[in-house]
Amino acid sequence: MNKTDKIYIAGHKGMVGSAIVRKLQQEGYTNLVLRTSKELDLTNQQAVIDFFKAEKPEYVFLAAAKVGGIEANNTYRAQFLYENLQIQSNVIHQSYVYKVKKLLFLASSCIYPKLAPQPIKESYLLTGELEPTNEPYAIAKIAGIKLCESYFKQYGCNFISVMPTNLYGPNDTYDLKNSHVLPALLRKFHEAEKNKSTSVEVWGSGTPKREFLHVNDLANACYHLMQTYQGTVSVNIGTGKDISIKDLALLIQKIVGYKGVINWNTSKPDGTPRKLLDVSLIHQLGWKHTIELEEGIRAVYKEAFK
Ligand SMILES: NC(=O)c1ccc[n+]([C@@H]2O[C@H](COP(=O)([O-])OP(=O)(O)OC[C@H]3O[C@@H](n4cnc5c(N)ncnc54)[C@H](OP(=O)(O)O)[C@@H]3O)[C@@H](O)[C@H]2O)c1
């Protein structure tokens, strides 16, 4: 990519899209095309056709999607499937029609089989049953990966996809109904500290282990792959390290400076015992994360709550 090439970042207001915009701006790219969902509803095929015809972007980062927590995924199953299929089909097909030089599609590690062996290799995709609560979302994302792969194989389009692990960082969601575990814990401990509560309730036993990546690291990885990677394998992006929810809660408690006690509500489900990506491929491709978890959470806490 040259610094003046026209680059469309779909979903630039979101956590991932905004991090990609920051990265491109830091690198000196000046010709970024950005549209909110109000300005361009990507589920509207005609609107997407008109947009590509008028703008003719040369590169596309596809970070627009309908995303949400377990409850939203499970409740709005039809919307998660339909809207994501529409968004990605419209953008990927018009990128083919208008000869986009390269497209990067954001998939997600939550679409691997529920009981995949650990750490999860790229080759485990489609080898087992999906987590039922987010199956419609996963099916849509798998279709997006297969679109990139098929347009690559049939038409020679340089469309790639990536599988990021759990992300955190600027522009995350902190409302407890829709947030993921890390921002939810930050909010809970922050409020407990502010309200001088004597205890904080955390769901589950604390034993499951999860991996977390700062979204700035993800943006660096996407930028790196956009410059260097060509292929049909959807590349895992993570740190290759995991932490138990218990240790994560203790770390966040320390960062927030909360002195009360943690009550583990073991009547709530734990979910999968472990979810860790095998990141050997992206390491071989020349990228490694740089932001360690404690440093990343400290920065996010300062930015979002202070
Ligand atoms: N967050 C994570 O932990 C995580 C982990 C792995 C993968 N990912 C993937 O990364 C991608 C982005 O996630 P995110 O966390 O950045 O989500 P997000 O913060 O909710 O952002 C999603 C973006 O999509 C846009 N969008 C949604 N529906 C649209 C529509 N109909 N037309 C146009 N734009 C639409 C929204 O635009 P407006 O703001 O303008 O409405 C928003 O900017 C997703 O594909 C997700 O699967 C995320």
Image (spheres, rainbow, N blue to C red):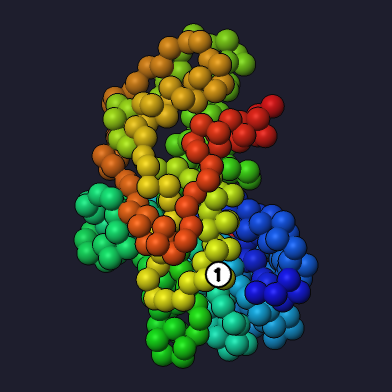
Query: Residue 87 versus residue 119: which sits nearer the camera?
Result: 119
Q: Residue at x 63, y 58 (%)?
A: 20
SS for dot 1: helix
- From the top left corner, tell me how far across and down residue 251 is, in percent: 46, 25
Residue 75 in sight here: no
Q: Quadrant of ligand 1?
A: bottom right
User: Is 302 situated left or right of 287 in this image?
Assistant: right
- From the top left corner, tell me how far across and down residue 134 is, in percent: 37, 54
Q: Residue at x 22, y 64 (%)?
A: 127
- From the top left corner, tell me how far across and down residue 88 is, in percent: 51, 72
Q: Amino acid at mark 1?
A: Met
- From the top left corner, tell me how far across and down residue 30 is, in percent: 78, 67
The correct choice, above or below, for 189 with respect to 67 in the image is above
The quadrant of the picture occupied by the N terminus is bottom right
User: Is 89 situated left or right of 276 in this image?
Assistant: right
User: Is 245 situated left or right of 259 in this image?
Assistant: left
Residue 182 in sight here: yes
Q: Residue at x 70, y 75 (%)?
A: 2
The residue tagged 1 is 226
The quadrant of the picture occupied by the C terminus is top right
The correct choice, above or below, for 17 with respect to 262 in the image is below
The correct choice, above or below, for 175 with respect to 132 in the image is above
Query: Residue 244 versus residue 178: which sits nearer the camera?
Result: 244
